[in-house]
Image (cartoon, helix red, strand yellow):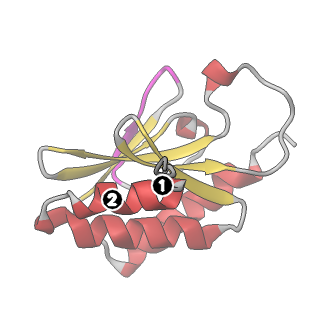
Amino acid sequence: MAKSKPSDSEQVDELITKLGDEVKATVQTIRALILATDPEIAEQVKWNSPSFYFTGEMKPFDPKEYKRDIVVCNIHRGKILLVFPTGAKVTSSLKGKDYPDGRKIVTIDDLTVTTTNQLQQLIKDWLGMVEK
């Protein structure tokens, strides 16, 4: 009998369990925060990282524009980088950088109440710009 493929959330769970202890709890907190921001946010593994995307109605677009993708949680050398593929259009006071190709990359050093509030506001602002 063929084994069924794990759900997207189960795949994210599995990926997170393989992370080092120094970042695992922070990634879990970020994951819960992002998913709690809006019911139309879902998760998957993309680019070998936990990734979050908008599931709601949108105007048609070229899939290579990554308009549905909200943020990818990339762990690089023990640092947590949140990559917003189209996030440069949203202003935020989070520590990071906007790139000419439209990406915003935010480095998460410490999850304070201020940081979590700013992260949630950034996602809400991004959702407010979605072309429906």
Element type at marker 2? Answer: helix
In x, y percent, where is residue 37? 61, 69
Query: Which residue, given by chain and number where applicable, does mark 2 sit on?
Result: 14
20 left or right of 41?
A: left
Image side of residue 111 versus residue 37, left or right: left
Labels 2 and 1: the sequence-earlier one:
1
Taking the spot 53% from the left edge, 27% from the top edge, the residue there is 102
Residue drawn at the location 73% of the way across and 19% of the way down: 62
Q: Nearer the viewer, residue 54 or 5?
A: 5
The CA span between labels 2 and 1 is 9 Å
- What kind of residue is marked 2? Glu
Residue 44, how many percent across, how many down? 51, 49
Q: How many marks?
A: 2
Q: Which residues are magenta?
A: 95-101
User: Within the magenta stretch, is there residue 99?
Assistant: yes
* Residue at (38, 63) in percent of width and height: 13
**Residue under numbered circle 1:** 6
